[in-house]
Amino acid sequence: MAQRSFIVIGAGVIGASVAFRLAQGGAKVTVVEAGDIGRGTSCNSFAWVNAHDKSPRAYHDLNVAGMAAHKHLAKELRGDWYYESGCLEWRGAADREAHVANVGRLQDWGYNAQWITADQALSFAPSIDPAALGESPVAWFPDEGWVDTTSYVRGLLAAASALGTTVVTNARVTGVECAGHKVVGIKTETGTSYRADTVVNCMGRWADDPVLPNELQVPMSPSYGLLVYVQAPGVHLNRVLFTPHCHVRPDASGMLLICKNDAIHALGPNYVIDVAMPEANALIQEASKIIPALASMRASEVRLGIRAIPADGLPAIGPFPGVDGYYVAITHSGITLAPAIGSIVAAELLNEDSEVTLSAFRPDRLITAP
Ligand SMILES: Cc1cc2nc3c(=O)[nH]c(=O)nc-3n(C[C@H](O)[C@H](O)[C@H](O)COP(=O)(O)OP(=O)(O)OC[C@H]3O[C@@H](n4cnc5c(N)ncnc54)[C@H](O)[C@@H]3O)c2cc1C
């Protein structure tokens, strides 16, 4: 049988995972990336591996598959990117009922979610101020963790390259080449054309970029997240903390990473993301309610993450309706999902069987065929 050929647009966690599994399946793969590898949302992410609060059930199950795939992949490639640290969660009084209900639901679904005492929580993360826990029950999720995403993307693309994949960086795709209702290739801003049997769009939050013809865009609903890195000498934290104030975890840089979902809502035209921005210090002060030593510390680095969220919040993964030779893989929670999506998508594209179905996440629920 002739070797199948694929162009993967985008070298984030999703593109790197899809490219690696396609190459492993014997395909000829070319990855085309607008910038440097892994510099999109994947390196501006909290990168917590979890299936903690994901609905509906099919989305939870896909995230559980992602968690299992991380363990497997890190062993398969001897990767140093996956940290199975476990996660501690507690909530404020207003959210306590919802917290108890969510943990109960997760337990009913067979997810490894345990109630632990405050003393146990403090033994897992001694730098936490006992007062921060208040009266809240504390949940412990031993199978959760986090990923050093730069190392992940580099590791997967190195493995894909060893299998013959070509990775082209600093080459923004500016057009898709079609023959009737079939996509046959792409062209980049330098005017270079690439041809393949199938183009796989792994452009993340740029999936609705006007460089794509209107009819090949995925409707998106992005949101912002602020990520504050702090050098915190003397603070030892080995877990992910999911708290009423913010999320905190260790990072491969040796710094602590602090994130809050609603720390930033909109960006004005003159918005500058840097260590002096008031939102960064406000986030550190929130984190100091959990780890008091942080109160006197300053941000070493601040990043803005823009989430790659398809319009209804769920992944959009599958053949593009009404267009041959064009497939999309766009999702939030992409750090958790990437290794599973890589395997499932490659199996589908290479006509192999997969144990996990993507039927709940097909793009045709968001897109009308042209
Ligand atoms: C603040 C924040 C916190 C998050 N926390 C978590 C979390 O805890 N756990 C979790 O699982 N997920 C989390 N996510 C989501 C996760 O980070 C994303 O779902 C994931 O990074 C998406 O990966 P991707 O490969 O699709 O996108 P990206 O990493 O953005 O990769 C897309 C690539 O496409 C390239 N590209 C774009 N346009 C073109 C073009 N025209 N030509 C060529 N290349 C192009 C870009 O340069 C980019 O490198 C978070 C996201 C944010 C923003």
Image (cartoon, grey):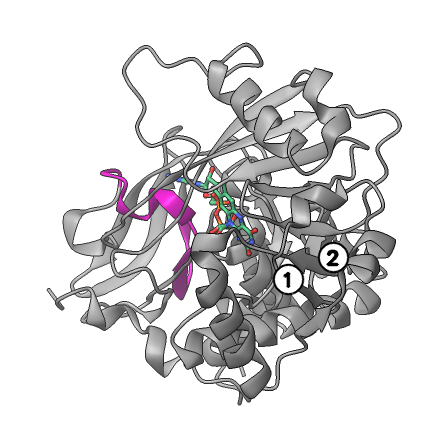
| Residue 254 in the image, given as x and y percentages of width and height | 82, 33
The magenta span reads 194-211
Q: Mark 1 points at which residue?
A: 20
Reply above or below: 321 against 231: below
Reply above or below: 8 against 228: below
Reply above or below: 88 against 166: below
Determine the secondary structure under disc 1: helix
How far is the residue under mark 2 from the one under mark 1?
7 Å
| Residue 78 in the image, given as x and y percentages of width and height | 86, 61
Determine the secondary structure under disc 2: helix
Q: Mark 2 points at which residue?
A: 159
* Mark 2 residue crowding within 10 angstroms, few (<14) / some (14–19) / many (20+): some
Residue 27 seen in the current view: no
State which quadrant residue 28 falls in.
Answer: bottom right
Q: Is the C-beta separation of discs 2 and 1 under 8 Å? A: yes
Amino acid at dot 2: Ala
* Mark 1 residue crowding within 10 angstroms, few (<14) / some (14–19) / many (20+): many
**How many labels, in total?**
2
